[in-house]
Amino acid sequence: MTSLRRFTVLLMFLAAALVLPAAATANTLLLTDYNLGNSNFVNNAAGGGGPFEAKTTGVALGVADFITFCIEYNEHFSYGGAYNFELSDSARNGGVGGGNPDPVSDATKWLYYEVVSGGYTSMYSAATGLALSNDVGANFQNAIWYLEEERTAFEIGGNSSAGYLLANYALANQNWNTLFALGNRVYAMNLTDAAGGRHQDQLAYTLELRTQDVPVPEPASLTLLGTGLFIAARRLRKKTVVNERVRAAIADPTV
């Protein structure tokens, strides 16, 4: 293989490496009872609800450990079980109310943001008239279930319950569009087991948009790459032609 051909093959491999996606990495989730040290989230909501502790691996959320809540009511998971997940804007394949998929409401996203950002410490009392206690997490779970049409007001304790008051405070005061514009993201983690069976979807937060796709180089970058490859190839070809002429002249001085 000539130098020109070897160089051309190398350039082709380099170009392909820039545009081909990396090998897919599985996103896994381990759910346990909440154990992150904040006493406000000690108690779980009745009916198998959160708060829970989520431990993730993979490209979607990275290696992370955070608080989460159920989105649906009538799906389940097992403590200590490893699940695969995808991030989306909607709960999938389950739920008492809503469609399939069922988009997560802006009020739910805002409530969850208040929890993960610590903003709940001031808004909780304003919304419920109650002091912080071990039941804060359970009340947020009930508020989320109510907003997602999974539980009725009666089922979460009535119109004077903390869950109901939190839900309505969120509906009246949420500013999710503003938070979204600043890069805040709340997703549904759509859980599946090893056999592909669906399980209880959970909430997840990121500060900026993160997807499972590897970004494709911008058109300007590809143009610059192509120009550089073209120039390098022409210079090498010119040098090769000159060298061939020199070798021919040495071999046959009459040429």
Image (cartoon, rainbow, N blue to C red):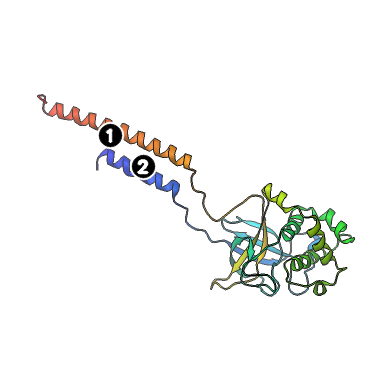
**SS for dot 1:** helix
**Mark 2 is on which residue type?**
Leu
Instruction: Assess disc 2: are there few (<14), some (14-19) or many (≥20) residues with their C-alpha within 10 Å of its C-alpha.
Output: some
Residue at the (84%, 72%) spot, across then down = 157
Q: Which of the two labelled residues, at mark 2 and mark 1, occupies the earlier sequence position? A: 2
Residue at the (87%, 61%) spot, across then down = 128
Where does the image place residue 39, in percent across and percent down from the top left? Answer: 81, 61
Instruction: Assess disc 1: are there few (<14), some (14-19) or many (≥20) residues with their C-alpha within 10 Å of its C-alpha.
Output: some
Quadrant in the picture for the N terminus: top left
List the residue tagged with mark 2: 11
Vertical order, 130 against 238 (above or below)? below
Where does the image place residue 30, in percent across and percent down from the top left? Answer: 63, 65
- 227 relative position to 220: left or right: left
Q: Report which quarter residue 27 is drawn in.
A: bottom right
**SS for dot 2:** helix
Where does the image place residue 144, in percent across and percent down from the top left? Answer: 75, 65
**Mark 1 is on which residue type?**
Arg
List the residue tagged with mark 1: 237
